[in-house]
Image (cartoon, rainbow, N blue to C red):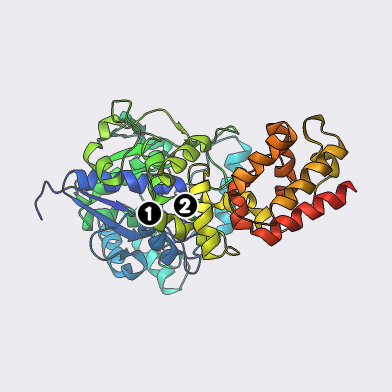
């Protein structure tokens, strides 16, 4: 492989569904690799066995494909590489960059609680650092549980250049002796990520800023092994516009699949995410994935956290819906309107194509077509209409709709004949048919409702008034 080949990766943990913030991270990693004629790899980080969710790895891969993001080669699965991690941790032990720790959980809890009581950052006290080889051998022979810890150097400066934030420096006095291998023999994230990124020849890592504080530990591991560290960019968080702080599932959807389930188009979602932390340097907002790849650059990534504006997302989704042809729209309408017949869908598509924001709105928007909506009779008395006037309007409407053709002209002629107020009449009809005042164009929807159901709803309205 050429030394200059750009290789990025997405490395989800199968502990749940894919977060929308992770999707943005993977989108940027994908774009950077493809922009530079490189490779975008997939690694499943399944070392956290306790939190692992059955089927999550498959769902993660499926949702990525649903969003049009593919990867090069076969996925790397960490749980299938345990021998590799043992080999490399052995190297660290032999070089005194790591050590066995036999401390019990009770002792570790006491250290943590004592530190908290003194308002200090909890750190391991290195009780096992200076165990003699004889003591270690005896503990291992006795089968005492242990972890393997990384030996952090004392009072050294660790620096790296973040591709977004610039130079960042830590002092090792602020770092804990990180566990590398857990008591079950499984590597921790911090160890496996370094070994895997090196062996997979990852050149650039794009990840969330929550990992900034862990980066000095990773830099030290690269130094211990004599490896060149990848270049790293830490993205800002996505902020919730309605509540302080980052996005939370307490305040709405946060998982990528949830947005698809709500009727957001993958292309619209990606376009929206492209601009949450990046801009092209112009006012342009609409990009296909291919266009985004051509335009993308790390230099245009933002240092300021982006706001996940759902109204802006709705704007993009409506924009992309209006670009769909009728065949594609038909498949989405069919998916979200399970009660609708094919003929009804064909009638409704041109009516709603320019009006809907997301497909999951369709069932509520068109509820009146599939069931009778209960409403207060006073709602029929629109714009100060009297009961007598409304009864007259609906009675005559029923008479002309016995013949269910050329509906718009028939109703227009009826209004002229009686000198009714046009706006008032159609609001009364809207309530009678839909049970609400804010609905899709009522006359255009009548063919989808059908003659019998239309007359039935008018009868219900008249019964409410009489």
Closest to the camera, between mark 2 and mark 1, is 1
- The residue shown at (29%, 57%) is 70
- Vertical position of residue 182 compared to residue 313: above or below: below
Q: Residue 35: percent from the left, percent from the top?
A: 20, 43
Q: Residue 204: percent from the left, percent from the top?
A: 24, 45
Is 69 placed left or right of 447 in the picture?
Answer: left
**Disc 2 vs disc 1: Cβ atoms closer than 8 Å?**
yes
For mark 2, give the secondary structure. helix
Question: Within the image, what quadrant is residue 285 found in?
Answer: top left
Residue at the disc numbered 1: 67
Task: Note whether residue 100 is visible.
Answer: no
Is 292 placed left or right of 309 in the picture?
Answer: left
- The residue shown at (73%, 33%) is 424
Task: Note whether residue 224 is visible.
Answer: yes
Q: Residue 401: percent from the left, percent from the top?
A: 69, 53
Residue at the disc numbered 2: 256
Is 427 placed left or right of 286 in the picture?
Answer: right
For mark 1, give the secondary structure. loop
Q: Quadrant of the N terminus?
A: bottom left
């Amino acid at each position: 492989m050429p030394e200059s080949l750009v290789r990025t990766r997405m490395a989800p943990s199968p502990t749940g569904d894919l977060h929308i913030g992770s999707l943005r991270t993977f989108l940027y990693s994908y774009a950077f690799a493809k922009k530079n004629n490189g490779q975008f790899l997939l690694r499943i980080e399944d070392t956290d066995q306790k939190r692992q969710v059955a089927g999550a790895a498959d769902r993660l891969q499926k949702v990525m494909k649903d969003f049009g993001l593919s990867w090069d080669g076969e996925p790397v699965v960490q749980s299938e590489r345990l021998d590799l991690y043992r080999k490399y941790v052995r190297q660290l032990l032999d070089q005194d960059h790591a050590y066995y720790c036999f401390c019990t959980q009770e002792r570790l809890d006491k250290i943590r609680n004592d530190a908290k009581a003194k308002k200090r950052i909890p750190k391991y006290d290195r009780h096992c650092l200076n165990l003699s080889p004889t003591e270690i051998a005896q503990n291992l022979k006795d089968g005492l549980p242990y972890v393997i810890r990384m030996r952090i150097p004392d009072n050294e400066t660790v620096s790296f250049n973040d591709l977004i934030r610039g130079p960042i420096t830590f002092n090792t006095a602020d770092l804990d002796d990180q566990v590398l291998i857990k008591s079950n023999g499984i590597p921790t994230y911090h160890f496996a990520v370094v070994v895997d990124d090196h062996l997979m020849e990852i050149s650039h890592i794009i990840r969330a800023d929550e990992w900034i504080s862990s980066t000095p530990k990773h830099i030290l591991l690269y130094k211990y092994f004599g490896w060149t560290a990848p270049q790293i960019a830490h993205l800002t968080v996505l902020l919730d516009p309605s509540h302080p702080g980052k996005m939370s599932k307490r305040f709405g959807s946060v998982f990528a699949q949830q947005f698809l389930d709500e009727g957001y188009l993958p292309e619209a979602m990606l376009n929206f995410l492209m601009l949450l932390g990046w801009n092209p340097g112009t006012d342009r907002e609409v990009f296909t994935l291919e266009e985004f790849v051509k335009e993308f650059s790390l230099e245009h990534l933002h240092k300021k956290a982006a706001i996940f504006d759902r109204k802006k997302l709705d704007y993009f989704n409506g924009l992309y819906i209006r670009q769909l042809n009728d065949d594609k729209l038909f498949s989405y309408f069919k998916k979200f309107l399970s009660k609708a017949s094919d003929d009804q869908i064909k009638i409704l598509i041109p009516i709603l194509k320019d009006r809907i924001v997301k497909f999951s709105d369709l069932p509520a928007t068109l509820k009146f077509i599939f069931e009778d909506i209960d409403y207060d009779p006073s709602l029929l008395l629109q714009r100060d209409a009297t009961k007598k006037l409304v009864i007259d309007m609906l009675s005559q409407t029923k008479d002309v709709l016995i013949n269910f053709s050329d509906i718009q002209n028939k109703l227009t002629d009826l209004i002229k004949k009686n000198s009714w107020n046009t706006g008032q009449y159609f609001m009364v009809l809207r309530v009678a048919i839909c049970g609400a005042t804010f609905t899709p164009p009522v006359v255009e929807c009548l063919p989808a409702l059908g003659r019998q159901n239309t007359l039935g709803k008018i009868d219900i309205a008249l019964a409410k008034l009489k």
